[in-house]
Amino acid sequence: MARSARPPTINDVARTAGVSKKTVSRVLNRSPLLKQDTRARVESAIAELGYVPNPQARALALRRNFLIGLLHDNPNAQTVLNIQEGVLDAIRETDFALVVRPVDRHSPEMLGDIREFLEKQRLYGVLILPPISENDELAALCASLGCNYVRLGAAQLDIAEHAVCSNDREAVGRAVDYLHDMGHRRIGLIAGPEGFRSALERREGFIEAMARHGLDLPRELVGQGGYTFDSGVAAAEQILQAAPRPTAIFASNDEMAAGALHVARQLGLRVPDDLSLIGFDDSPIAAHIWPPMTTVRWPVRSMGKAAALKLIAPDKAAEQPSLFLSDLVRRASVQRRTRPVERAGG
């Protein structure tokens, strides 16, 4: 068919495909309420005519912008960046754009501020990062405003349509199993910050695995961290004062594990000869420090992509996993324990 001088319109597509304008709109908006042959006929007409949808017009019709919001209050910038990269993977070559909105979970105005943001921006949907993803009132707010949402977390927080999660508790248990298999019996824990479900899941996974192996976890071998390098330093300084000193430390993220490595060097301890270390995330810092850090790979970029696809491709929502499994990445920061544990004064 010869193309006219003017750009093709949605009405031209409808006539060529032999369907209604509303059906074309449903194809463009990826509605699941269409037969496959109808969808194929419309897509063929779009390709034949060279029709390019107008995102502003589509936004007016949907009463929503083609914007995906990312709500977060997370002290680990790398986690937020990895999620962003996953979302960008999902929306590449689409009309969608990403809007990042940091919030303050401690503010009494948080829900009101988010309400105002959602009402003004008319977002297509929002992704909510931990720890605010654990706030049921926030999920209810999104639902009340008709704003589709997906909550990311270290445990199942919602029905599959609205959640993407990981198996942090189980993954940390496997990290402790590995240390036990390598001969370590006195193992320290740098826990994550209070108020984070991920910190709770990782702590509980550690405690359960220690109990399963019949290992004690004295109070002096537990340090409280905040998912930052400096908090890892402070926690490791406390743990490594214990007598006898632990032969291994599990840190609830890589930033804190890097802080523990820094303290070990300051104390003249060799990693992994004198102290084995395991982190969590498999962030770039884990592979770039020396020795390279054994860590639990948290598939956060894949989780971000899956969460975004749940928003922008509802017809494919059932194909998107809601649970992502973490696995242990073994590098050079763990060594088999062959010498006896150092005793106080010896």
Image (cartoon, rainbow, N blue to C red):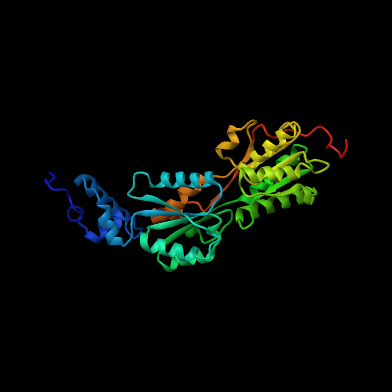
Residue lying at the far right in this picture: please name it: 345
Q: In the figure, residue 236 lies in which quadrant?
A: top right
What is the residue that sits farthest to the bottom in this orientation?
A: 144
Residue 72 lies, with reference to residue 240, above or below; the image says below
Residue 217 visible from this viewpoint: no
Q: Which residue is more in the foreground, 25 or 254?
A: 254
Task: Please name the residue shown 27% across and 60% down the image.
Answer: 60
Q: Position of residue 151 (x, y in %)?
A: 50, 57
| Position above or below: 222 against 111 | above
The one nearer the camera, 90 or 231, is 231
User: Is the C terminus in the top left, top right, bottom left or bottom right quadrant?
Assistant: top right
Q: Is residue 131 above or below residue 273?
A: below
Residue 217 location in percent, x, y? 78, 50
Image spot of residue 127 (x, y percent): 46, 55
In the image: residue 64, left or right of residue 180: left
Identity of the residue drawn at 70% across and 38% down: 263
- Residue 321 visible: yes
Which image quarter is the N terminus in?
top left
> What percent of the width, then of the height, locates residue 227?
61, 48
Q: Nearer the viewer, residue 213 or 269?
A: 269
Total labels drawn:
0
Left or right: 223 as drawn, with respect to 65: right
Q: Quadrant of residue 330?
A: top right
